[in-house]
Image: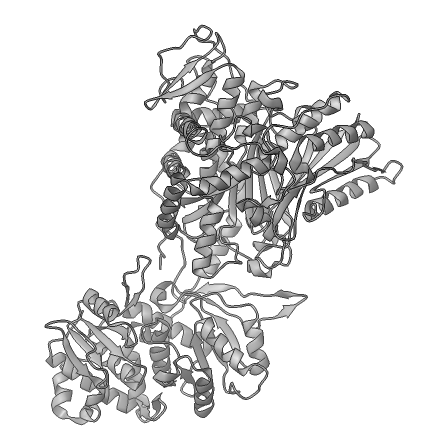
Amino acid sequence: MGRGRTVTTRTTIDGTTDETTDETIDETTGGTAPAGTGTPTAAVPTDDNEAAALLAALERRGVELWADEGRLRYRAPRGAFTAPLRGRVAALKPYLLRVLRHRETSLSDTVRAVPDPAAAHEPFPLTDIQQAYWAGETSLFELGGIRAHILLEFDRPDLDPARFDSAWDRVVRRHPMLRATVLPDGTQRVLKDVPPLRTRVEDLRGMPAGAADAELERVRRTLADEGPTTDTWPLFGIRILRTERSHHVFLTVSLLICDAPSTALLLADLERCYRDPDLLLPPPPLTFRDYCGAMAALRGTDEYDRALDHWRRRAPELPPAPELPLAKSPAEVDRPRFVRRQHRIAARDWERVKHLAGARGVTPAITLLTCYARVIARWSKSPHFTLNVLQSQRRPLHPDVDALVGNCSSTLLVEVDASAGRDFAALAGDLQRRVWADLEHGIVSGIEVLAGRNAARGSRTRAAMPVTFASALHVAEDAEDTKDGEGGEGGAAPASGGGWRRRIVSSRMQTPQVWIDHQVFEDNGDLVLNWDVVEELFPDGVPGAMFEAYLAVLAALTEPAGWEDAALPPLPDGQSAARAAYNDTAVDLGERSRLPLHGLFAERVRRHPDAVAVICEDRELSYGEVDRLSDGVAGRLAAAGCGRGDLVGVVMEKGWEQVVAVLGVLKCAAAYVPVDASWPQARRDAVLSSAGARHVLTQSWLADPVETPGGPYVLPVDSLDGDGEDPDVREAVGVPADAAGPDDLAYVIYTSGSTGHPKGVAVDHRAAVNTVLDINRRYGLGPEDRVFGISALSFDLSVWDVFGALAAGAALVLPAEGARRDPASWSEEMARTKVSVWNSVPALLELLVEYAAGRRGLVPDSLRLVLLSGDWIPLTLPERLRRITPGATVVGLGAPPKAASGRSTTRSARWTRGGGRSRTAVRWPTSGCTCWTRPAGRARTG
């Protein structure tokens, strides 16, 4: 990656050699440019390693910095501690204090990295990030099957290939990780001896016009896609192509052995060795193996235990990754191919941004992270998400840690809440405080945190946090304090690529399990921005529009007004029009849409009272029977004081009584609260207590459905069988069928809640009726249909099972309570009753398909429609169902009815697979609704 010099004005301060000053440094001392210079604060990093890099640069100048009761003090030669450097130190004060504290404890009381030459060639474990990259080479993981590597292309007209080979050989001998390989057991080993490099020059001179450029592009793409192997040496590759004008040198290095600071070290060493053919650079005293051993030892410290406790508490609170618009599921991408977008911000403009950032106490890297977050928030379904931030984490476990080559990176999971109402500066400040707080516990990597989170959720192979950010600003900053050819303590090379860095003409990088990878670094004072995107994941034009929006947000930050802007970046006109068309859902559902749920049922009772409404294993009920029985329930509830707005518990096993109960509750203008009879008693009591239910409907064989002293009125619904004809009971109802209005509450369904305590989701009649009528209209539900009510009443899919069927005049088929997880019983009941419609989560359909696989007739040919929602639909499931029953259409409905007013639907008449790919369908909002992303992450309906 490129690196360069940040333009600053150097104003000396008074001081004497080795004289301790009593002046302390804080955020108000030199935090911005001296008056009149126009020079802003230098770029400030986002992690402790960048602060360590600044300390190293100061030490090379002879500046000694130390902590004194929360203050920073310094000793410096005259003229060495310039005003810009003081500004950088002031802005970095929290990081520097932490690094100095870590140095003091890590190097004395806890863990030190000790060189161990005798074990230099023994195998040692991969780090977290190496393990992630190595595992990502397999296709077992989503967006895997690729080798993590960086490709650099250099343009060297004056190249001497033999001299280059000699120089690179000496670099390989100097840095052990350039001789490393990964063993089959997942460990790594440094080889003692490797053969010298002999690069063959591919001569493109004399080729027809344009052919040489085409061959260069072919090689560029091939190397960018392939990357070096990791199981055999070398984990780097070099190709040289000679054209009429120049030599093009392609260097590709595996990210298992190299991070951004390592790249800078390698290029600096290559330049020094190329300049001087006789130069032999000694190996750094500390090896990557030594460093990894010390990092592993940190796991036994109190610091690690505290960090682990922090992340165990923090991880469940982290929001998911950004929900960006996708053209296909990531699981459908056979082999990710990245498209790079790059832009360069001129040094003058970048300095202006840094100046305004420093004036607001925000670091440049956080400024860029905030720009990125704002743009992601514009396209994300929710503005509350988690970004995966790469940090170069070289802990000060040895004085020469900055001289080693290896991938010392780690990751930090950064929570972003880009809600509206806060301007850019406020959002950046909040993000910076959150990053700093979590970095205090950065000894536990984001990869470790994510692994535990994924394991708990059963999603080990998914790309769980695929939107990433990496800042290498600190790599560029260090160059301004170092001259080419100077060595640091222990033979450390300066972190500057010299002539080789300046000759980079293109670069590419790819990493597994990533959708968008954003990198930032400086080059000769300019800011360089890279976006590497798996383009095929996204709809046409979206990645380009996002990148342009990012550049617009950043450009606005050159003026104070940009920092005060609270609005997210606008969408391009074409995408705004597409969203408007997407949300053009106005459909007149007629007078029925203004009825309550039980009003839809009452219509069918008047038309066809003798039609079958509910089918159970041992009983069928007509619409008229259900109506009379539910009148009986309503009458008893009304007599017991139940009325409008009350919440009534329905504690039952699956059966006809559930249907009668919920209709009876609604006829009282009350709302029902379904409680599964199989739940533990404590959970049942907690839900009913939370709902404040004074009335509970149950079944007579369920002993003590409620254990609450002085508890609610309890009515076994099956005991009313036949009471519906009692005129006293019917008269006692006393509530007309239209008593409940569209805005009255219909039901409250309790979820487990992220805190482990049940949380109720309340839905009114208007939202539920809209969903019922819309789905019935879309898929032609009618009196001839038989709906299989497999879902529990306490699960929100049951709402459509019951009321969708009854509103259409169809029959609801209920499996027996004991058959809730028995696909053999389902198969028999579906065949007996000629079920035509299935509605469930994908996992239940999976059970049926697995049971019936390879055997025709176990799923009836009458099945015409399968509705799935509530979870990811396995890509192979529709095709496997079709092999069993070809006539069924599979439809993904997205959100369950608890979000009825904002429900979306995936219409999929065909799920095809061809050429190893699957096709997913498009999703639309429910008729009469629009889907928006509100700043607070709530769904807006209209």
Quarter of the C terminus within the rendering? bottom left
Q: Which residue is more in the foreground, 479 or 126?
A: 126
The quadrant in which residue 493 appears is top right
Q: Which residue is more in the foreground, 470 or 401?
A: 401
In the rendering, at what x and y percent does residue 515 appear? 55, 50
* Residue 339 in view in this figure: yes
Q: Residue furthest right?
A: 206
Quarter of the N terminus within the rendering? top right
What residue is rendered at 40% in x and 22% in y? 90
In the rendering, at what x and y percent does residue 371 appear? 47, 38
Side of 533 relative to 677 (left or right): right
In the rendering, at what x and y percent does residue 78 appear? 48, 7
Q: Which residue is more in the foreground, 670 or 461?
A: 461
What residue is rendered at 48% in x and 45% in y? 388
Work out whether 488 lies above or below 684.
above
Work out whether 746 lies above or below 226.
below
Work out whether 614 lies above or below 294.
below
Q: How is the image coloured?
A: one colour
Count of marks placed on residues: 0
* Residue 502 in view in this figure: no
Side of 694 relative to 550 (left or right): left
Q: Residue furthest front?
A: 118
Work out whether 914 lies above or below 395.
below
In the rendering, at what x and y percent does residue 914 appear? 66, 68
The quadrant in which residue 424 appears is top left
What residue is rendered at 54% in x and 23% in y? 348
Side of 705 relative to 835 (left or right): left
Q: Which residue is more in the foreground, 847 or 650?
A: 847
